[in-house]
Image (cartoon, grey):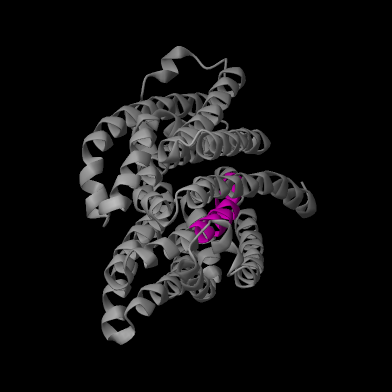
Amino acid sequence: MTDRGMIGAYLRSMLPAVLAFAFSGVYAIVDGFFVGRYIGDSGLAGINIAYPMTALLQAVGTGVGMGGSIHMSISLGRGERESHQRLLGTTLVMLLGMSVLLTVGLWFAHPTLLRLFGATGAVYDRGQEYIQVIILGTFFQVFSTGLAPVFRNLGRSLFAMAAMMAGFVTNIVLDATMIGVLGWGMYGAALATIIGQGVTAVLCLGMLVKVERGVPLRALRPALWAVRRILTTGVSPFGLTMSPNLVIMFVNLGAVRYGGELAVAAYAVVSYVAVVIQLILQGVGDGSQPTMSRFFGEGREADVRLICKLAYCIALGASAAFALITVLGQTWFPTIFGASADAIGLAARVLCLIVAGYPGIAVIRVTIAYFYSIGFDRYAYVLVYGEPLLMVVLLLALPLLGLGLDGVWLAIPCEQLLMACAALLLRRMAHRSAARRAKA
């Protein structure tokens, strides 16, 4: 295949993944849009404070699904069909087991977690109403996020995108009906989300039965070696999905301390915008991963590096465009969520601050995808789990330097830019390590 043909094939695989992540990001803010309009600041703050628990469900699904699908892709690149089937079966069983454990665990833990995240009064009530329904729909959350990367690695990115779009449209229609027409409030918002995720999960399970109907039933018996591989690699995409939400949780705690409910409501709007952008940039990295993993399995290391460079260019270009859109829409975004006048003014100011970190997000997300595509899992761990740790340090330090609430907001782009520098340094170290390995 020529370079032009290879790049064309890569783009056809990557772009649907970016669109799927974009829909996933919009998915995350649809509830906020209707809740902000019909319930107000307490509803917005309640969803935002409860969201780390929703994110945990999605992160577990993504971690298991990505961990399994990365090794499936490598196995297919090496022509190891039986290994691919056993990895697929083990992935499905692990997704089911995690669904059961998370449902039981979060049902008993969520009241304590809400208080730990800083929820009190009306914000606590709204958050509990929302998260209880989400927890009961854990199966759909885990399977919808866990099966999407499987289809991307099977060369069916368009289907993965279509399945997510179907869930997204379902969620919008039901949100408008259950919140706006029936007046079901936070329960309606959560129920619409679960049903939408259920549509995606059912479509994916149905297609998987059709595509992999030749897989023997014995492949559904988990293999210890497959579990080890899935968990070793899955720790990185799990953290990559969870890390931005841990950051949201830590920033919420700082906002509560230095700015109260108004700051939390303003940051809810900011986080909705930021989540969409982060997910799209993550889509560039994760959409590039199947191609890089397959080329790595085939021993085409030069082509892996070429795809990585293309991903950097696309992600950085997108980050510049998003920065411009964010600045131009600084007052429009809070308005469409129905934020109060005071929250709009504060959110607009914060949006102008966080755009400085967008290029850092682009570099981090692509570099992490590159690392777990080529087996440098430990380097990926440093970046994934370094983000929330560095954020904690900055949130403790900057406000105490006399910056107060401004220190909370400035911590966001500072963390992203510092971690981007770390990503480039680790990438250079990885290249040197790979070169030494090749000579040996």
Q: Nearer the viewer, residue 64 or 112?
A: 112
Q: Give x and y (percent) for residue 399.
A: 30, 79
**In the displayed structure, would residue 82 be above or below residue 337?**
above
**Count the marks: how many?**
0
- Residue found at x 62% / y 59%: 311
230 in relation to 322, above or below: above
Please provide percent x and percent y for residue 6: 73, 49
With respect to residue 257, does 147 lie above or below?
A: above
Query: Where is residue 401, by image quadrant?
Result: bottom left
User: Is 359 situated left or right of 314 in this image?
Assistant: left
Q: Is residue 130 magenta?
A: no
Q: Quadrant of residue 387?
A: bottom left
- Quarter residue 328 falls in: bottom right
- The residue drawn where x is 65% and y is 33% is 159
In the rendered image, the quadrant that contains the C terminus is: bottom left
Closer to the camera in the image, 107 or 188: 188
Q: Is residue 276 above or below residue 323?
A: above
Q: Is residue 400 left or right of residue 235?
A: left
**What is the residue that sits farthest to the top in this orientation?**
217
Segment colored magenta:
272-291
Residue 128, x across and y down, in percent: 31, 42
Q: Using residue 94 as the reference point, say whether residue 201 is left or right of it.
A: right
Residue depicted at 51% across the width and 54% down the height: 369
> Is residue 13 in sight in this rendering?
yes
Observer-nearest of 356 and 317: 356
The answer to if 284 sits in the magenta stretch is yes
What is the chief secondary structure element of the magenta stretch?
helix
Q: Position of residue 215 (x, y in %)?
A: 52, 17
**Could one spot residue 299 in this view of the protein?**
no
Q: Residue at x 44, y 40 (%)?
A: 185
